[in-house]
Image: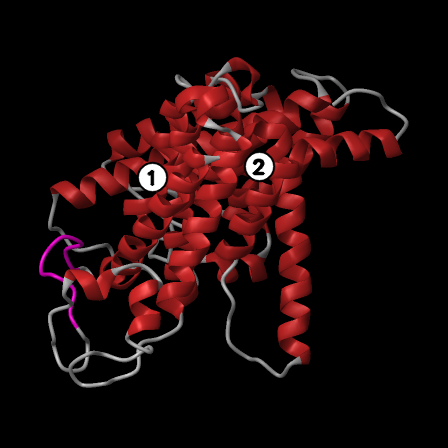
Amino acid sequence: MFSIFVIAILGALIGSFANVVIYRVPAGKSIVFPASSCPKCGHKIKPWENIPVISWLFLRAKCSNCKAPISFRYPLIELVTAIGFGLLAWRWPLEVYGFTVIPLLIIFAMLVMMSMIDLDTLLLPDSLTLPAIMVGVLGTFIYRQNSGLPSLNQALVGGAVGAGIIALVNRVGSLVVRRFADTKERLWPIGMDQVNVAALGGALGGWTWGLGAAAASMLVNLVARKPIRLPELTVYALWVVALVVSSFGILTTPVGGISGTFIATGIVAIVGALFWWVRDLASNEPLPDDSEDEPVAMGFGDVKLAAVLGVILGWQQLLAALFLSFLIGAVGGIASRLAGGDRLIPFGPYLVLGGLLALFFGQDLISWYLGMLGISGA
């Protein structure tokens, strides 16, 4: 119990830091320097004024210098992070599971940051999503076998499937495409064309075919020194045909065609995202211009966020997470419309909420669903 309390206090402190990240990362500012200050008068916040939740209450939600109001959002994020840390420490106590909980704590804090940034800006920064994927993968090396968390192979498959499903939703549905878009599309040497080809190849012959098709497409780009594009509508028309072909067990099984599509698409999307992230860090070259009818980017954040959830859940519980996310998102969207709201609500927070519910209750949901179908086991 003491360790849970200590970890919850740590969560509050991390929540205070999360407030800094949420404000500064979208603005392109350093998260280390300068020290935090009042946005109105510039008063440097003293250590005793920065105690999570307590300082906000003691200061009566006002700056000690200019008396400008301090938003309730700051202590709320600190409380949410503290509660989340406490729940994770309760579910995976140090005394039983050792350091299993550490990667989960790191990813939870990053998920809080991502959700708030997405709400504020409709963006999910690569500087959070991609490192979170890496933490989730590395975490598999310290998970205890009886923890209920995925192995390395399960995490990799889960991440690929998560990214692949959302990428396909992104590409196939024109309304959803615009809904998820968050940056400009990159075309050379790797871009969404390779994601499309991976989906086609994966449906036809399994995930290895998908990766091979994407690699061949990228090689053609490199040889031509320019993007060689295939009409997207044609590619996805052929994709439907490929799924029909695989349903007859030609070249691959029906399950192999569907899983191959998701896995190959997800791998190519994440590899492309990593490529462009590293390139952007190493280069100051401007992003390529795109026409307005090309709204989707290789860096679309919800795809990478789904990969984060996949690596900590595994593919089975990921499916439960996506179901919950879409369900909660639909209810939230309807409620917002009925309330007269017209603000675009990002999907990221819904993904996070569905993922966290699946993390704690996913196996129970899967068992319940299989029981409804009359299938024993999970």
What residue is drawn where x is 64% and y is 77%?
Answer: 337
Q: Amino acid at mark 1?
A: Leu
Left or right, residue 52 beside residue 146 = left
| Residue 321 image point, x, y percent | 61, 42
| Amino acid at circle 2 | Leu
Is 109 located above or below residue 78 in the figure? above
**Mark 1 touching mark 2, by CB under 8 A?**
no
Q: Nearer the viewer, residue 256 or 12?
A: 12
The residue located at (33%, 56%) in the rendering is 184
Estimate the x, y position of residue 335 in percent, counting from the top left.
67, 72
Query: Any magenta on residue 31?
Result: yes
Where does the magenta region start and end? 29-37
Instruction: Please tell me whether mark 1 sits on a helix, a strand or a loop.
Output: helix
In the image, what residue occupies the spot 42% across and 51% down? 81
Depth check: give the residue in front, 2 or 134. 2
Which residue in the structure is indicated by mark 1?
130
Q: In the structure shown, which secondary structural element does the residue marked by tag 2 occupy?
A: helix
235 or 303: which is nearer to us? 303
Q: Residue 250 placed where, x, y %?
A: 71, 17
Task: Determine the residue located farthest toward the right in the rendered image.
Answer: 374
**Viewer can see residue 136:** yes
Per the image, the residue denoted by label 2 is 359
Quarter of the picture holding the C terminus: top right
